Image (cartoon, rainbow, N blue to C red):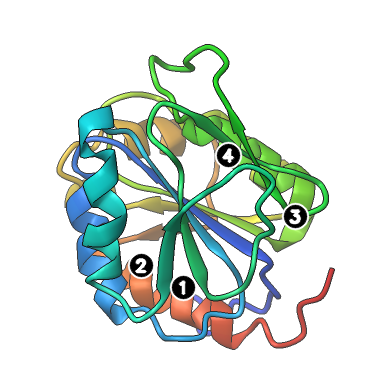
Amino acid sequence: MEKNSIGRSVGLVVIGGSAGSLDVVLQMLPFLNGGLRFPLIIVLHRKISFDSALTDLFAGKTALIVKEAEEKEELKPGIIYIAPADYHLLVEANHTLSIDYSEKIHYSRPSIDVTFETAADAFGKAAVGILLSGANADGSEGLKVIRSLGGITVVQNPVTAEIPYMPQQALGALAVDYVLDSHQIAGFINKLSDDTAAYSE
């Protein structure tokens, strides 16, 4: 990370990942500060059978509230929302969530692109997208939308990714704001929160 201050007020952080990203999230969660000043959404590709255990697994690693996202739920600061397995998770303009069962994108549901793109539409320059390890190209198009609307784009350093294909695809598709090693991600999110006192809709 080259910049000492993000200099941006953040309204929502979305983390997307696929193969190899679960360990990154598990390593990150214990280091997140309590009372984050924005909601955080995690979109992971995974098998449906693993879904019921994921929320409990994450909740055991952080002091923040962790819950599976629900239809029409209002986003609230300091809560980590998990995209349900086998559903797309959309962020609406009024900062609520929608669950969608439309076709898979990049063979994936939930699609990282869908959540990134709708988060960008809803939060504009206050949206942040963080793309982790994975084995397909999901997430790159969504990061493009976030960047085009003035948001912050972050990609895990492929060198530290168990499966570098997904971050490499993003780096080949756009100029991202930050490329972070896996151990830097929690500190980056905490810094975003520190800089977010003035955020308002």
Give the CA separation, mark 4 to mark 2: 19 Å
Q: Quadrant of the N terminus?
A: bottom left
Determine whether label 2 and label 1 are within 8 Å by CB.
yes
- Neighbour tally class for label 3: few under 14, some 14-19, many 20 plus, Cα within 10 Å: some
Q: How many marks?
A: 4
Q: Label 4, secondary structure: give it.
A: helix
Q: Quadrant of the C terminus?
A: bottom right
What residue is disc 1 on?
189
Name which quarter of the figure residue 61 lies in. bottom left
Give the CA separation, mark 1 to mark 3: 20 Å
* Numbered mark located on residue 88 in the image: none
The residue depicted at 82 percent of the width and 75 percent of the height is 200
Q: Name the amino acid type tagged 3.
A: His
What residue is disc 4 on?
115
Mark 3 vs mark 2, foreground winner is 3
The answer to which of marks 1 and 3 sits earlier in the sequence is 3
Residue 112 drawn at (x, y percent): 48, 35
Q: Name the amino acid type tagged 2.
A: Ile
Give the CA separation, mark 3 to mark 2: 24 Å
Determine whether label 3 and label 2 are within 8 Å by CB.
no
What residue is disc 2 on?
185
* Numbered mark located on residue 95 in the image: 3
The answer to which of marks 4 and 2 sits earlier in the sequence is 4
Give the CA separation, mark 4 to mark 1: 18 Å
Q: Label 3, secondary structure: give it.
A: loop
Mark 4 vs mark 1, foreground winner is 4
